[in-house]
Image: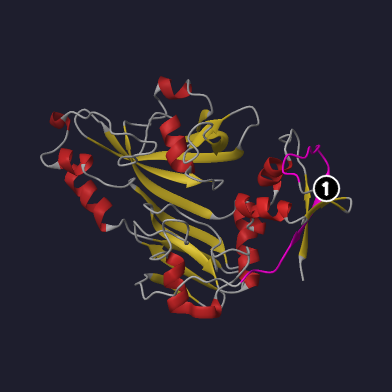
Amino acid sequence: MSEILSVTIAADPPRRLDKALARDVPEAAALSRTRLARLIADGAVSRKGIALTDPKAKVAEGEVLDIAVPPAEDYDVVAQDIPLEVLWEDKDLIVVNKRPGMVVHPAPGSRDGTLVNALLHHFGGELSGVGGEKRPGIVHRIDKDTSGLLVIAKSDRAHHGLAAQFEKHTVRRAYKALVYGVPDVGDPRLRGVRGVAVEKGGVIRITSGLARHKTDRQRQAVFFDGQGRHAITRAKLLDTYGEPEVLSLVECRLETGRTHQIRVHMAHAGHGLVGDQTYGGRRKLSQKALPAGAYPAITNFERQALHAAELGFDHPVTGEYLLFEAELPDDMAHLLSALQ
């Protein structure tokens, strides 16, 4: 039996139904844009009992739309015996340290070798099916080439509880990133970048909307004036490298968790991530500024230098606060060692 999800359209909505829902549906509902489009086409979205099947239908602020969300579908993903580093497991959830290069869930072009394939082998039918897609247990994601901590739900109760914490932005998420340049709060250039502000403790706050790039649909882009999904990243300088200083290790904390958020925000601030071919680019670095052997290590680094190092949340069933830390993976550790 379908579950009815009521969504109230917030202020200044996009003119189209599909875009308004994509913006305003709670993250806890775990409804992707693709699934929302399918639900609209299937007549599962209604206004005052009347089905809305046109994705271009107009909506207004304050309107309440009902979405009939069917039960999760059976998934046909193949279980695969792929090693996992499991940091925590109980009857409700699992915490893993994902290696770089592993896709979280199957998608066109990545049908196997994913975290979900591995989870199905290790935990079988114990995983939550909330979300209705081939993402059993998946509450949040990190990019394929980002390493680090993820929590996976085994029970539907845990899934809903965790998703609610992500939606309220109460989950502690700290990443370590190696970036070009030095994002120093004293840099007058930074203070002139739109959306960038300085907070106590040497913290740089980057605030913007994030949405798909207007011409390159594989990229996210920064928007202002109410466009895109609200996103806040806080970055703090941890260490610098080179003489003169040309690279920095930064801690980034997420208040929101949008697609590619850290990568886009740091690039917007002028400090793209090392190895990020989509947003960071390959900067020209003086070999003389770096220790011997560090220059080729930087130029040959094959992924964005980003690691989900801390993850903290309230256990959705017991209420106990859990905090996990993951050391840098070998490739980033070796890279920083070469820079010392």
User: In the rendered view, would you say 334 is above or below 155?
Assistant: above
Find residue 149 and report its horizontal and vertical position in percent: 43, 60
Please tell me which residue lies in front, 328 or 76.
Answer: 76
Q: Residue furthest right?
A: 48
Q: How crowded is mark 1: few (under 14 residues within 10 Å), some or many (20 or more)?
A: some
Q: How many labels does the image show?
A: 1
Taking the image as shown, residue 329 lies to the left or right of residue 198, namely left
Dominant secondary structure (helix, strand or loop) of the stretch shown in magenta:
loop
Find residue 122 and report its horizontal and vertical position in percent: 43, 78
Numbered range of the magenta stretch: 54-73
Find residue 185 and report its horizontal and vertical position in percent: 42, 29
User: In the rendered view, would you say 5 is above or below 185?
Assistant: below
Taking the image as shown, residue 179 lies to the left or right of residue 287, namely right
Q: Name the residue under label 1.
A: 64
Please tell me which residue lies in front, 83 or 70.
Answer: 70
Q: What residue type is labelled 1?
A: Val
- Res 322 seen here: yes
Mark 1 element type: strand
User: Which residue is depicted at the point 68% across and 41% down?
Assistant: 19
Is 59 included in the stretch rendered in magenta?
Answer: yes
User: In the rendered view, would you say 16 is above or below 25?
Assistant: above
The quadrant of the picture occupied by the C terminus is top left
Is 225 included in the stretch rendered in magenta?
Answer: no
- Res 340 seen here: no
Q: Residue furthest left?
A: 292
Find residue 21 and report its horizontal and vertical position in percent: 71, 46
Q: Which colour scheme is used?
A: secondary structure
The quadrant of the picture occupied by the N terminus is bottom right
Taking the image as shown, residue 29 lies to the left or right of residue 257, namely right
Please tell me which residue lies in front, 6 or 212.
Answer: 212
Please tell me which residue lies in front, 254 or 204.
Answer: 254
